[in-house]
Image (cartoon, rainbow, N blue to C red):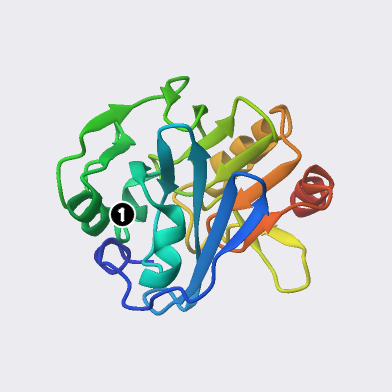
Amino acid sequence: WPILLIMAEPKTIAADLKEVVPGLFHWSIHDERIDFQSDSYAIKTADGRVLIDPVQLKPGLLEKLEPISAIILTCGSHQRSAWRYRKEFQAQVYAPALSKEIEEKPDHRYSDGDALPGNLKAVFTPGAGTTQHTLLNQGEPKFAICPDLLMGNPDGSIEVISEEYAHDVNLAKESIKKLLDLPFSILCLSHGGPVTDNPKEKIRAALG
């Protein structure tokens, strides 16, 4: 996926919003930039909602997520509608410290191990690209939001990012193995949606 293509904001607007488990929301689009599904998440906190890699959500549905207090990018190529929502809601944007190809200056930079809004912890998981961080929920329910390493299929299976699109597919596989040591029971993919049924078994199957 060429970097200029994935930096541009997608034109498609999500028309559906689902609550995966209490406090964790998900919406997605068929992303015309990459001809594949792109997924976004939001976490309910006492201070407002934290958006993760947000694509645009239909206004009537977006109101269900207000107030929006923070926006987190898992990598530089997932800017999507982050700058639109920062301007609209005066929300703080958090981006990986390593991100260079980025359209606007984020309010905060983060690195491996940092604590983030929404009771999330950043875990550096490179390979698909060079800036990807998995976001691990430190409370309940245990979920991990993972960018790009794994893709979800319509049949419920998942697969490792193809070598064609990966920065370093072998490094990606090492990062995927790292996921297996993290405490979570829900895997939230940035391309394929949430995996709630035995995600670690599906990760092992993807690794072969």
Nearest the viewer among 165 and 75 is 75
Q: For the residue carrying disc 1, how many other residues have a C-alpha within 10 Å: few (<14), some (14-19), or many (20+)? A: many
Task: Tell me the kind of residue under disc 1.
Answer: Gln
Identity of the residue drawn at 66% across and 39% down: 143
Q: State the count of labels.
A: 1
Q: Is residue 191 above or below residue 123?
A: below
Could you say where residue 116 lies in the image, as x and y percent from the top left? 42, 27
Is residue 5 shown left or right of residue 26? left
Residue 108, picture quadrant? top left
Q: Is residue 62 above or below residue 184?
A: below
Residue 145, picture quadrant? top right
User: Where does the N terminus fall, quadrant-wise?
Assistant: bottom left
Could you say where residue 78 lies in the image, as x and y percent from the top left? 37, 54
Nearest the viewer among 4 and 27 is 27
Q: Is residue 77 above or below residue 112?
A: below
Could you say where residue 102 lies in the image, as x and y percent from the top left? 21, 49
Q: Quickly name the residue at label 1.
A: 79
Identity of the residue drawn at 56% across and 58% down: 26
Could you say where residue 40 lies in the image, as x and y percent from the top left? 48, 57
Nearest the viewer among 28 and 90 is 90
Is residue 186 shown left or right of residue 94? right
Identity of the residue drawn at 58% across and 32% down: 136
Q: Is residue 47 above or below residue 84?
A: above
Nearest the viewer among 195 and 13 is 13
SS for callout 1:
loop
